[in-house]
Amino acid sequence: MADAHRREWAFVLAATVRVAQDLDLAEECVQEAYAAALSVWERDGIPANPAAWLTTTAKRRAMDAIRRERTFRSKMPLLVESEELAPHRPADRDAAKLEDAVPDERLRLIFTCCHPALAQEARLALTLRLVCGLPTPDVARALLVSEQTMAARITRAKKKISVARIPYRVPRPAELPDRLAAVLGVLHLLFSAGHTAPSGPALMRTDLADRALHLARALRELMPDEPEVRGLLALLVVTDARRATRTGADGRLLRLEEQDRSRWDRGALAEAHDLVVAGLRGGHAGRYLLQAAIALLYAEAPSYERTDWPQIVALYDRLLALWPSPVVALNRAVPVSMLHGPAVALTLVETLEQDGRLSRYQYLPAIKADLLRRLGRTDEAATAYRQALELTDNEVERAFLEGRLTDQGNSPT
């Protein structure tokens, strides 16, 4: 059942919301379908096509709920009584055209949820939670806020959809560009949650990483001329090329400099290279294309020590000017430490620490600890490693941090 939930949630919800025309109702019906599966599958066995069984059950519950409400002469908050939007009319040519514009059902639902009437953070939170199936705590970690703040943000977004009567419908082709930035953000965060799971025993959630890659490719087919779509796909592909080497045979986390570069996916690196070069030739480099170019420089270096640190720092400078994110500034500190030394980088990290926006981001104290260790300030490094441990819920990352403390003669507690 857990596997079915991870694999099929987005598919089932996407199909159900087309019938329900209401995100709350659709989510409720999908949850009821999964609850029904627990008893029915235990009695009758798992069906040959679990997704189809769950989808049929959830859609039937949605239709029953709609009929009951119509009987009592009440309306669903998101029901739109127009020819163009009615979901129960399969012969509606306009609706069919809209669905043809975004053929992938999960991508279609992501575009639908990324409505411009919602704030950007609300779009990201709602879509990651409902469409991508991430638990609220993991969505909170991805967006660097508390679980309570995230739960309230999702509730407000759903309430705004209901009160403002924002219709559920697939956006027209002309409306896609206005939603693209949010869709790109969702796919990037979804991949990040798969590349390094926010919590749990495994370093990765490969189902999420694979889903993000699939959706990024579908988006590229849908909008092949968008530079940032190309940039996002390149970033995901080059990052995923190292998948097989990120942990050792014993499950231990391997840092970039420890990984066996001969085992990286050369086909993926070649694909990313072509995407980045084509994007840079286009003249305008957005945030995803610049991130992909940085990741490609790391990946194409013959060794970690022989990485082109000046070029990476220069690209980070361009990225920061375009997108002044504290996470980008923190990531920039790593190549700065290789180019100008750990003391210079430590000053940058301490400035970000005082800023406070990364107070929930475990990689800030982790990077600070590594810089302090390189400077021989072992007691301060141990304190920073313990701070990182307090913020880290992924068990593989926790084991790595505990190992760092033990190597320095310190107890993790």
Image (cartoon, rainbow, N blue to C red):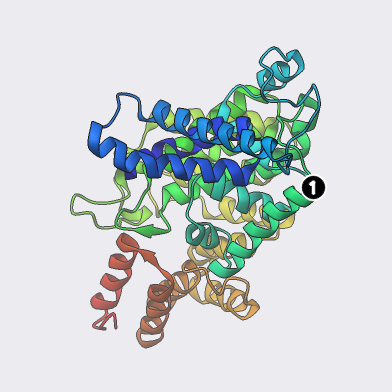
Nearest to the observer: residue 233 or residue 337: 233
Q: How many marks?
A: 1
Q: Give percent across and percent down for residue 156.
A: 69, 59
Disc 1 crowd rating (10 Å Cα; few below 14, some 14-19, many 20+) is few
Residue 291 visible in the picture: no
Image coordinates of residue 233 in percent, x first then y, are: 56, 34
Q: Is residue 36 left or right of residue 319?
A: left
**For residue 201, which quarter of the picture?**
bottom left
**Residue drawn at (31%, 53%) of the image:** 202
Which of these two is toward me, 20 or 312? Answer: 20
Identify the element where label 1 is drawn.
Answer: loop
- 6 or 51, which lies in front? 51
In the rendered structure, which amino acid carries the disc numbered 1?
A: Ala
Q: Residue at x 51, y 62 (%)?
A: 141
250 to the left or right of 41: left
User: Looking at the picture, does residue 168 appear above or below residue 320?
Assistant: above
Q: Quadrant of residue 374?
A: bottom left
Instruction: Kindly tell me whether residue 255 is visible in this rendering.
Output: yes
Q: Position of residue 22 (x, y in %)?
A: 65, 41
Q: Where is residue 149 shown, x and y percent of the image?
A: 61, 68
Compared to residue 93, the image places residue 251 above or below, namely: below
The residue lying furthest to the left in this view is: 250
Residue placed farthest to the front in the image?
A: 72
Q: Quadrant of the C terminus?
A: bottom left
**Mark 1, residue position:** 117
In the depicted view, which residue is nearer to us: 147 or 178?
147
Q: Quadrant of residue 1?
A: top left
